[in-house]
Image: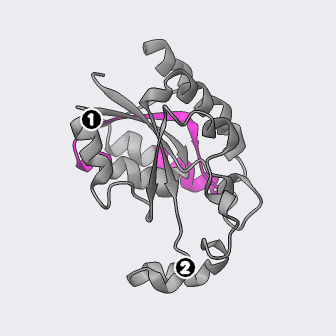
Amino acid sequence: MKIWRHLCIDMQCMFIEQTPWHVPWMSRTLDPIAEVAGRFPERTIFTRFIPPSRSDLMPGKWRDYYKKWEMMTTGRLPADSMLLVAPLRRLVPPGRIFDKLTYSPWTDGHLHRILVRENVDTLVISGGETDVCVLAAVLGAIELGYGIIILKDAVCSGDDDGHEAALTLLERRFSVQSNMMSVQEFLSAC
């Protein structure tokens, strides 16, 4: 591990609170994530999934997606739903926030350009959901050539089977580019 950043995916109020997108066991990953981010806030980048204000503002199938989830658009949600959960919010700054409109943080190229300028070659991944936004972040990072460490006890999903399938996929099919570790294993190696 040379130059690394902790990429914490979408630990936001709208996922931890009782909304249609509630991730029931996100609260169980909060302490391990806060431990990593709290030790290395200057190396932590928090992504936030920011829905549009209306479904018709999105292209293609995203429009259909937000027609289904209209109640989860920023036009309908309280503004504080987009915030990071409280224990993580206090770490910014020096931690940074990167907002994204899709599952992947790589779509517009901005995050990659920042990491290239900082000579980052490894990403330590935490957050939610394992089988959606975390998976998109990991696969995109692999495509861009980053080494990946997935903190297996610091990722979560609203679908246990999807969570397990995503971790199994990443461990079996991307073992050259990615590594699974517990938070304690990672912290002991730092």
Check disc 2 and give the amino acid type: Tyr
Q: Is residue 153 magenta?
A: yes
Determine whether the residue tagged by mark 1 lies in a helix, strand or loop: loop
Segment tinted magenta in the rendering:
141-167
**Residue at left 55%, top 81%?**
54
Mark earlier in primary sequence (1, 2): 2
Work out whether residue 171 or residue 47 is closer to the camera in this orientation and state it. Answer: 47
Residue 149 point in image, percent of width and height = 40, 32
Against 125, residue 133 (above or below) is below
Relative to residue 4, is residue 19 drawn left or right? right
**Mark pair 1, 2: CA separation:** 36 Å
**Tag nearer the camera, 1 or 2:** 2
Residue identified by numbered label 1: 176
Check disc 1 and give the amino acid type: Val
Residue identified by numbered label 2: 66
Cβ–Cβ below 8 Å for labels 1 and 2? no
Q: Residues within 10 Å of mark 2 (few under 14, many from 20)?
A: many
Residue 188 point in image, percent of width and height = 49, 13
Q: Is residue 84 magenta?
A: no
Residue 175 point in image, percent of width and height = 32, 36
Work out whether residue 96 or residue 39 is closer to the camera in this orientation and state it. Answer: 96
